[in-house]
Amino acid sequence: MKKILGLLCLLIMISSCVSKEKILYVQDVRENLPDEAINYHTTIKSDDLLRIIVSSRDPELVQDFNLFVNPVLGNDLMAQGNSGRLLDYLVDVDGTINFPVLGNLEVAGMTREEVRKMIAEKMRPYVSDVMVDVRIMNFKVSVLGEVNRPGTYTVNEGRLTLLQALGLAGDLTIYGDRQSVKILRDINGVQQSYEVDLTNTDFVSSDYYFLQQNDIIVVDPNKAQVQAAGFNRNASLFVSIASLLLSVIVILVRN
């Protein structure tokens, strides 16, 4: 019985072990990390919410280009200084926004910097020293699966890497498959997927290192965890139960 119990404990410990090559992130970081600048751009899509602030040394010159929601009249809009809450622009299904004075502007597929330059250029005839700030207000990603805090996270900066998103979710659990993290991304209405190996630095140079708004990250359980079907997490419990049973058996035999 003792030999059987010992063999059982040994099998449990072996099945609970995971090679460090499957756990450590970016293991070749010293040798293969790219030394050139990484291209980063977040493109604007339909249903995005944009906050566009136009400013100048003379606020009166740009007051008609900044729409605010009147806190007293509800949804009525007004173009006045800081008298109300600034309105976010919803990108229509055709990829346009209705901008004050300038009319419909096509912004889908453009970066924030490209939209900023376009609006500034169109406003030159009205304001010579115009300054434009464009931000994506609905930049959020969802992290699901074998992470400590799965959920949807909103980022105000509009710039987020895959590793930062996993950090927001409390990192992968020890049971997460670090060699095959899935990223689901909507591209022109078509859902596409990409797999990332976090143990290798190749993903840093890919288009999926910097996330896009509404990306979904899925972390699957590793193979050992799938095969065990929850056995690994209860290994210590099984050992305790087996030890208790052995103790009971020994007491009964002695008596």
Image (tube, rainbow, N blue to C red):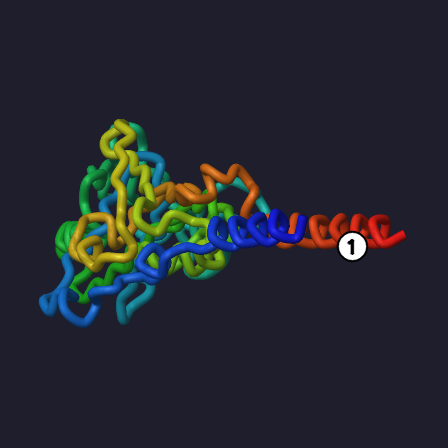
Work out whether residue 145 or residue 233 is closer to the camera in this orientation and state it: 233
Q: Which residue is mark 1?
A: 247
Give the residue type that dot 1 points to.
Answer: Ser
Can residue 183 be seen in this snapshot?
yes
Work out whether residue 136 or residue 240 is closer to the camera in this orientation and state it: 240
On screen, residue 7 versus residue 109, left or right, reads right
| x, y percent for residue 136 | 34, 50
Work out whether residue 108 or residue 119 is closer to the camera in this orientation and state it: 108
| x, y percent for residue 121 | 13, 54
Q: Report how many numbered discs are placed on residues in the image.
A: 1
Q: From what the image shows, is residue 222 above or below residue 57?
A: above
Label 1 element class: helix
Q: From what the image shows, is residue 190 above or below residue 247?
A: above
| x, y percent for residue 32 | 14, 65
Can residue 64 be seen in this snapshot?
no
Task: Kindly identify the residue that appears in the image at 19 percent across and 40 percent down.
Answer: 109
| x, y percent for residue 212 | 29, 47
The residue most toward the front is 254
Task: Kindly identify the residue that appears in the image at 51 percent across and 48 percent down.
Answer: 150
- In terms of image quadrants, where is residue 142? top left
Task: Kindly identify the residue that appears in the image at 41 percent across and 55 percent down.
Answer: 18
- In terms of image quadrants, where is residue 81? bottom left
The residue most toward the right is 255
Mark 1, Cα crowd under 10 Å, few <14 / some 14-19 / many 20+, is few
Task: Kindly identify the residue that appears in the image at 52 percent across and 55 percent down.
Answer: 13
Work out whether residue 5 or residue 82 is closer to the camera in this orientation and state it: 5
The residue most toward the left is 36
